Amino acid sequence: MPTLHRRQLVGHDILLARHGNHISSMRVDRHSGRVVAFLDDGSTDSAPNVISPGLRMPETMRSVLRDDWRFLAVVTACATAFAGVMFAAVVAVAAISGDPELTALLTSYTGS
């Protein structure tokens, strides 16, 4: 079963090995897949953020939501529609029955 892990940024490790304590800040350039380091002397250096382009990284919550948002939206819409149909059915049964006790029971039931 796959688990969700925070992705490790390989570029951070590469830049730390190259420059050590001379790095003042780092940022991730997701568009190019690199980590950019700003050094104490004002220069910059960058390193790739992947070990191998074909390597499949572990899933994160953000990547799952980004990849599966359509599926999750359809499931949510279906569950909401089903709840609406069930609510309408209860209201219809209460209206059709004519029995005041059944109407009171169905309209006051909290579901808990």
Image: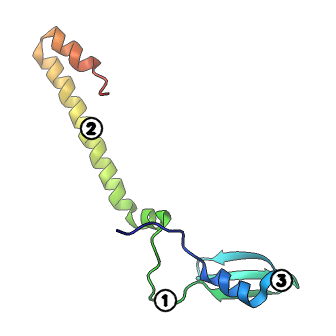
Name the outermost residue toward the top. Answer: 100
Check whether the beta carbons of the residues at disc 2 and disc 1 lie within 8 A of each other.
Answer: no
The answer to whether 7 appears left or right of 83 in the picture is right
Camera-side mark, 3 or 1: 3
Q: Which label was assigned to residue 83? A: 2
Name the outermost residue toward the front. Answer: 1
The tag earlier along the polypeptide, 2 or 3, is 3
Quadrant of residue 69 in the image? bottom left
At label 1, the amino acid type is Pro
Q: Secondary structure at mark 3?
A: helix
- Estimate how packed mark 1 is, as few (under 14), some (14 to 19) or many (20 or more) residues with alpha carbons within 10 Å: few
In the rendered image of this protein, does residue 55 appear above or below residue 92? below
The answer to whether 85 appears left or right of 42 in the picture is left
> Which residue is labeled 3 in the image?
22
Q: Residue at x 46, y 74 (%)?
A: 58
> Which residue is labeled 1 in the image?
53
Camera-side mark, 2 or 3: 3
In the rendered image of this protein, does residue 67 appear above or below residue 49? above
At label 2, the amino acid type is Ala
Quadrant of residue 36 in the image? bottom right
The tag earlier along the polypeptide, 3 or 1, is 3
Q: CA distance from mark 2 to mark 1?
A: 45 Å
At label 3, the amino acid type is His
Q: Residue at x 67, y 80 (%)?
A: 12
Instruction: Give the percent coordinates (x, y) of residue 88.
Output: 22, 30
In the rendered image of this protein, does residue 84 appear above or below residue 73? above
Q: Residue at x 12, y 19 (%)?
A: 96
Q: Which label was assigned to residue 33? A: none
Q: CA distance from mark 2 to mark 3?
A: 59 Å
Q: Secondary structure at mark 1?
A: loop
